[in-house]
Image (cartoon, coloured by chain):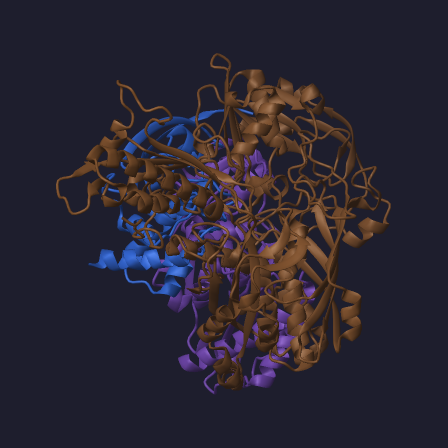
Chain colours: A blue, B brown, C purple
Amino acid sequence: MSTEMHAITVTVNGTHYSRQVEGRLLLSDFLRHDLLLAGTHVGCEHGVCGACTVIFDGAPVRSCLMFAAQTDGHRIETVEGLAADRDHLHPLQQAMRDCHGLQCGYCTPGILMTMKVFLEETPNPDEAQIREALSGNLCRCTGYQHIVEAVQLAAERMRK
Amino acid sequence: MNVTTRNFGAPIRRNEDPRLLSGQALFVDDVELPGMLYAAFLRSNVAHARIRSIDVTAARARDGVVAVYIAEDLGDYWAPGPLLVPPPPIEGITFNQRTQVPLAKDKVRHVGEPLAVVLAQSRYLAEDALADITVELDPLPAVVDLEKALTGDARVHDDVRGNIAARVRQSRGDYAAARSRAKHVIARRFHYDHGASSPIETRGVVANWDARANQLTIWDTTQAPVFLRNGLAGMLGLSERQVRVIAPFVGGGFGPKIMLFYPEEVVIPWAAMRHNRPIKWIEDRLEHFFATTQERGQTHDAEIALDADGRILGVKDVFLHDTGAYNPYGLTVPINSQCTLLGPYVIPSYDSTFTAIFTSKPIVTPYRGAGRQHGVFVIERLMDIAAHELKIDRVEIRRRNLIPPDAFPYNNEIIYQDFAPLSYDSGNYAPILDKALAMIGYDKFLADEQQRLRAQGRHVGVGVACYVEGTGIGPYEGAKVQVQANGKVSVATGIGTQGQGHFTSFAQIVADQLGVEVPDVDVVTGDTDQFYWGAGTFASRGAVVAGNAVNEAAKAVRQKILKLAAEHFECAEEDLEIANGAVSVVGVPGQAIKLGALAVKANPMRGAVKPGAEPGLESTQYFGPPGGATAAGVHAMIVEVDPQTFTLEVLKYVVVHDCGTVINPLILAGQIHGGVAQGVGNAFYEQLVFDDDGQLLNASLADYLLPTALEVPHVDIAHTVTVSPLNPLGIKGAGEAGAIPVGPLFAQAIEDALGLLDRNVELNEIPLSPGRLFELTAKLR
Amino acid sequence: MKPAPFQYVAAQTIEQALQLKAEHGDEARFLAGGQSLVPTMNFRLTQPAMLIDINPLNELAGVSNGAGERLRIGALTRYRNLERDPATAPHLPLIAEALPHIAHPQIRNRGTIGGNLAHADPASEMPAIVLTLGGRLRAQSAKGERWIDAANFFVGALTTALEPDEMLMEVELPKAPPRSGACFMEMSRRRGDFAIIGVACIVRLDDQGRCAEARIGLCNAGDGPVFATQASASLAGRTIGKDEIGEAAKLVQSAIDPGGSIHASKEFQRHVAGVLTTRALTKANERARGAA
């Protein structure tokens, strides 16, 4: 079996990375272990838990179901790129902190990336819409309630 | 100069969140070291078999593979793991210790048991090499059904007849006499099945042996780093000082990450020392269903004897407990079931016997609730059935049996998981019940709303369930608190953190004692180089035991601050005040010294010190409670059930909880929400489905159903506070409370929604599901 | 759970993709959304020797008008785009109603309708809807192209009529006609899970308010999507009321052969099929009357 390498240039959080990748390297592993952006977490590798969610060309996707080789010429955003800088968290991050929306923090990056795009598309969501948007991310610690409150708070702050 | 309570009890935001929120928190799989090798384990795909041969030649020859090991390669290092929790000192106990091994030898006893380990340049290559390994197994009949296990010929352990891992009988009073006096005796069989903890982060171990430094560093998702360090040092022939175990940020524990000396945990450090290179093993989700411990089922034949007014005269219970292929955790889970069945009720006579049974399935060790769910289900269901039979309201019958507030400490006599008699330290249960009833609108619902909705064709029901939770058991924990030269305070303790917010709650305790801000207190947990002693995070004890140790250490440092400052200002300690990071003389502006400066003073570079003086503003203290603190609560729920599809929607969910003094209400609420979510999963969605060959049929998150934001309801929480007399802070644990009574709550509420008891259908098993409700109501169609 | 090694090729043209598929047959798989394929690869249940990534072939995506009152949906059209396409709700109401039940937003951002149809999971919503609508599917190979009626496309569980060298290019579906109502309903354990049973139905009325045509299809009711022929025919020419709906529901129950699973016994699936057929037909009928 050939271990052919593929040249890719992918933009992650605004930075261009040129790399050689094996065809079967999962995007989640590429981000975490090749680019050392370990904020994206792996929970199941079969597309159910959502911990690995990143934004691909503007849409949240499961990075465990994509191959790094597919990303040539595309644009990815991960949790490391969410805050403007160390002192200025994204309103979602700030709201999650203010509302105790995370406990162990493992599912959190996937939720942040999912909800970032959700709030951009639905800036004034009700609780039912938030829970539906959240239903593709599993959390085992929080019971989701504080996360919902955080999203509501972030939406309110972002509308101002 | 009183200690402030500015922070204690306040909903302070967490210190650790900015790092977690920006992906800058280290989890085990984030550890990257030069020269690291990656491990994959070959696991048995049959539940029970003799191993005829394992041929790893082809695997060893594969490009990129550095080594492949089987049991024989481990030599003298291969040994069954230690018994982590010996059986409590109960008379007449039968206990057969059989513990897990690093790699299977001679026999495999459950699907997923490790047979070999491959070390390669990448996890991808290691998994490729697994396919190169040839294993010849002679399958044996699997032991799956608990009753058949006792009477059949198949033996999980060849020398353990009837697959009996243990038999324990505990009693108080005289049940036979109680039964003969009783006006009503109700007997039923109950099945309670709990599931897999399924934290979003699976397990993992990275071991790095540095031969030049003579040092072994291990990153592990463990809940018990200190015991892991001690055990591995012993096994590997190292001194404890040569081994550092770090439990960094851990993505959820819930119990199974406190199981110790898992095969992988034992093999990977050994391999690291052999190769003098870092070795990483990260459990994938598929492995998690077999390789990490879980809870499973019990079958109870229980009986309750009552007088004419519905007062309990006694309970008798005989149950079978599935302990899996090995029993390294002793009897913790079934003992918890046995003890927690007594609940908040006066049960004068109690006769409980359990048989723990080896099966050809993964090991059972505590998972949030740790067997309490099973016991609570039995007693709550018996109460519901009794209420129906005696025509007493189900809340009223509970109220009549609650332990009165003047009866504490309440001694239930039987032995609990901490080896001490089960004694409830304090409690006041009726107000909890009252508050829950008020919040759910119980009376109004039954008198009015339920009928109104029924007339609209909607089937809505209410449920109320009570429970107690033994928390905060020993043995002990310790903490070191130190004021640094920069005025910040560092805290270290031996337990680990898996999301409970210790970095903040412990900081709150210290901040109040030392007059600093919570963000200025840096807490380290889970690093054996930072704190040497401790037991671990389990059984809802972190805040109680480690929290109190932190408090004692902070108090001791406070005393040192006052003493030194009094010398410095030449005044009495009573004239001093500590606030805003400085010590000042009350009423004398300008007479103030920052804590950092005082710390420098306490550690002079030159000069003579008084004999007996300790340098710095630092103290290490330990706290060991005389017994567990008993928390209590009531959950209430209104649920709507579709009478045709049996799908349901929780319309309202209420928790009233009493865990004594509360350190951080926001963190506490999070614990309760999370517990309820796991309880909802346990009650209606999650079930490990094994077939007759011991194969798990739903080993993926697509088929093992964890509840999402659409299945977990909004939870309204209220508290009552009944302080614990067993520790200076008066706190009780709360980590498991949310998960404990949800099963019987669902059963009761669904019965109410569909009017099942009146139609002679009882829901005496958990989990339920639409399909199961369809089957259980068959006779009604 | 890392996939076994394979050769990855990013297709530059449709011709290249078809040529490679012709050369490698079943040893090569097309990578579209990957939301069904990649999990099986990570579990190593599927180990293709070659993955032909067709995502670069943008011409395979998009919704356009076909001949007559029909819509053509390119195989690479992602669910996300169907959700946002203004043509979906008015013209393909069954799809619009089913989309929120298909997995989760992140999956729908990548998953494609073609990938789902070619995967042919009996529990999937799209095959049942395409069958109920009586659509047709275009397959192409290096040798040429052909149209396959939905009724002939789904051969069995995870099996379609596609030859080893063929790629599914598009699906053509009739737009909702005037005086019609449609309803898709599904019961699953959690939102987004595979259906325990899903029902798709369309009711078209004549100008007297009687049923001109009814079409009822189900997912997870057999080893492929099921079209309930007898039940559908039973409504034609009649004024639809509770009795007629009840009769149709019973006919559906006796027509299907659900496989059962750990989540639902066959008996329960059959029971739910009756319940959902009743509810969905009632709703479709109401909507048809509303549209009349």
Seen in the picture, residue A83 relative to B710 is either above or below; the reply is above
Q: Is residue B659 above or below residue B135?
A: below
List x then y, in percent, for residue B461: 55, 76
- Quick check: can you spot residue C194? no
Residue nearer the viewer, B420 or C238: B420
Whole-percent x, y for residue B475 in the image: 56, 41
Foreground residue, C29 or C109?
A: C109
Query: Is residue B171 shown to the viewer in this render?
Result: yes
Q: Quadrant of residue B751?
A: bottom right
Image side of residue B301 versus residue A93, left or right: right
Q: Residue furthest top?
A: B212
Rendered residue at 54%/86% (across/down):
C239
Question: Which residue is depicted at the point 26% across and 18% down?
Answer: B606
Measured as percent of width and height from the top left, residue C94 is found at: 47, 66
Q: Is residue B19 left or right of residue B378?
A: left
Q: Work out whether C119 lies above or below B568.
A: below
Screen quadrant of the C terminus of chain B: bottom right
Q: Quadrant of residue B510?
A: top left
Q: Could you tell me residue A6's position as x and y percent?
A: 42, 27
